[in-house]
Image (tube, rainbow, N blue to C red):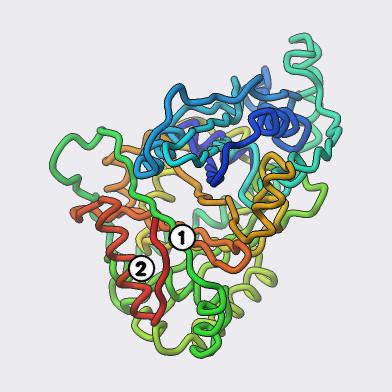
Amino acid sequence: MDHALFAQHRAIGRNVVIQVVWIYEHPIDFDGVRRFNRNLGQGFVGRRIERSSLPFARHRWVANGGPSDIEIAERARPRAELGDWADERAQLPTDPELGPGWHIGVLPLTDGSTAVSLVISHYLIDGFGLALTIADAVLANTRDLGYPELGSRTRLRAVIQDARQTAQDLPEVGRALLVAAKLARRRRQDSARSPASRPVALGGGDGDDVVAVPVITVHIDLDDWDARAKALGGTTDTLIAGLAAKFGEHLGRRRAGDGAVTLQLPISERTVDDTRAVAVSYARLSVDPTRVTTDLRDLRAAIKQALTTLRETPDESLQLLPLAPFAPKRALKRMASATVADPDSPVFCSNLGDLGLVVYALAHNDAEAATISAHLYPLHLIRVIGQDVTRQWLERAGGQLTLQSWRIGGKIAITVEAYQPGAENTKAALRELTARTLAEFDLAGEVD
């Protein structure tokens, strides 16, 4: 999975990162942040991808300590510019192959508070794994993963070792080829029964210009949230999914024909010692968005059924993963294009749950412990974001809608990232839509 995702995205020039932003209402301990940065290099993300010398062999992990220092802004900025600064940091390059795989920036704000941004390559770790990695770095828990050093093999030795590994993988490759042939026959039959899809037309302007996809974060009182979920016959997870479905309706992501909204829910498979970068599977379900503001029971049942289906009927396409090292760039591009042009326009909805207090306290010093005890939680934003996303890509995808939620003590936080072709794609418009959508559920929150 890690090889396939990295290779496919490299083929189309895409780079995906995870960003976490903390805000402290006091000057931060810079040495503590530097210590945190060093500790990251002693855990799951202290690695790089080393490509094989053979064009058809698997890549491997090698050890890499990460960036040597944090970046501190030369001048303070007003609190109103925090979002702009976070957007700027999110677009600074990361490279899981050449490095650095992550970077940390610190911004003093003119009101005396301090912001910290961590941006890390998604090809090193997923969201659930990053929560564990941050906790380890805060507590100075180091892990010896036994990775070799970058470039530690001679070319001859690398060729011999990778050829041997490829030979050992051949039985899996053979089974994957049989599955690929079966899926290809099924797709040809489905295509013959359904009308051909028309190409998506680009809107006005230069389709290759880079677009900043608007993103906002809303914080809602946890007691109000849980009470509303219960009143609607749902749970915290169900209410988040219902909110995602209603956002999907407002942003024109209803399916042609039945008017349903398709939700895609990532389900973590990560264990404590899991070293995969991507350790998730995806449950997919259809939701009637017109009912979710008054009754969540049908949605709750649909989520339960989707999870049961995921557990009992694994995705056949996952059996194709052994073919990833053999796929030419053209094939990787075709697969990526098929994913982008999903006719159901799914809404990505992820819930990290309660990450634990240790994730909130970045530098782990006495001042931060006092902050936490006062229920002023510094964790401000978590989001998965594509770098250098073009208008052409967004138009072909039919837009984008992602909700990422987590708990912060007495609050639930939800990050909303949205783009709708032809609409007013600004943070102001997204804030207004968020407030209106929450009101439909009889909820209100602080929207940043």
Whole-percent x and y of residue 370?
A: 69, 52
| 382 in relation to 40, above or below | below
| 100 in relation to 409, above or below | above
Q: Residue at x 39, y 80 (%)?
A: 441
| 246 in relation to 429, above or below | below
| 162 in relation to 325, above or below | above
**Left or right of 294 on screen, residue 201:** left
Count neighbours of disc 2 (C-alpha within 10 A) and say few if under 14, some if 14 to 19, many if 20 or more: many
- Secondary structure of the residue carrying tag 1 is strand
Count neighbours of disc 1 (C-alpha within 10 A) and say few if under 14, some if 14 to 19, many if 20 or more: many
The type of residue carrying mark 2 is Phe
Whole-percent x and y of residue 432?
A: 27, 63
Whole-percent x and y of residue 35?
A: 73, 30
- Secondary structure of the residue carrying tag 2 is helix
Residue to which mark 2 is pinned: 247
Q: Nearer the viewer, residue 107 or 11?
A: 107
Q: From the image, which quarter does the N terminus lie in?
A: top right
Q: From the image, which quarter does the C terminus lie in?
A: bottom left
What is the spatial separation of the Cα atoms under label 1 and label 2, in whole angstroms? 9 Å
Residue to which mark 1 is pinned: 403
Q: Residue at x 53, y 25 (%)?
A: 72
Does the CB distance between marks 1 and 2 fall below 8 Å? yes
Tell me the number on the disc at residue 169.
none
Q: Nearer the viewer, residue 51 or 113?
A: 113
Nearer-N-terminus badge (1/2): 2
Q: Residue at x 51, y 58 (%)?
A: 404
**Left or right of 190 on screen, residue 284:** right
The type of residue carrying mark 1 is Leu
